[in-house]
Image: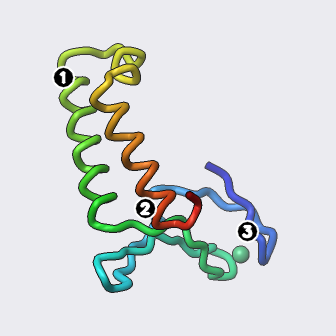
Amino acid sequence: MKTICNDCTKEFEMTQDKLREKYLGAMITEIYYHCPNCNNKYSVCIMNTKCRSLKRTMQFEIKKKFAITNDIESILQDEKIDNIQKELHKEMNRINGKA
Ligand SMILES: [Zn+2]
C-alpha cells in the first residue's frame, strides 16, 4: 500500500513490518509507524486487551475455515467470523473515540 507523508509529501510503501507497537499503560497499546524519510510518526489505532484477543480469535477461526475450504466467499460469510469482526470493530471504535 502506497502512502504519502503529510509532512514531507514523499511517497513510501506502507508494509506490515513498519508497524510498531507501544504499550501506553492500562492494558492499552498504540499501533503506529514512522515515515522512512522524515521520521514523522503516524498513529494507526489504539488496541486494548479485548481487541487483541478478538483479533487473535478471528485469525484462528479464519485459519480453521481455510483448512476446510479455499472459498473466500464462504469464509467471509461465516457467521462466527462475521460476529467476531463486528465485535472487534465496535470495540476499536469505542476506544479510538469514533463511536
Ligand atoms: Zn515524511
x%, y% of residue 31?
Answer: 45, 69
View quadrant of ligand 1: bottom right
Find disc 2 in the rendering and name its residue: 17
Measuring 29% from the left and 77% from the top, which residue is drawn there? Answer: 27
Q: Is residue 67 above or below residue 53?
A: above
Find disc 1 in the rendering and name its residue: 67
Classify mark 1: residues with Cα within 10 Å, few (<14), some (14-19) or many (20+): few
Which quarter of the image is occupied by the C terminus?
bottom right
Find disc 3 in the rendering and name its residue: 5
Residue type at tag 3: Cys
Q: Is mark 3 within 8 Å of ligand 1?
A: yes
First reached walking from the N terminus: tag 1 or tag 3: 3
Q: Is residue 9 above or below residue 68?
A: below
x%, y% of residue 37?
Answer: 67, 76
Q: Is mark 2 within 8 Å of ligand 1?
A: no
Q: Is residue 97 above or below residue 90?
A: below
Q: Secondary structure at mark 3?
A: loop
Query: Could you tell me how far apart the alpha carbons at marks 1 and 3 are, in whole angstroms?
Result: 39 Å
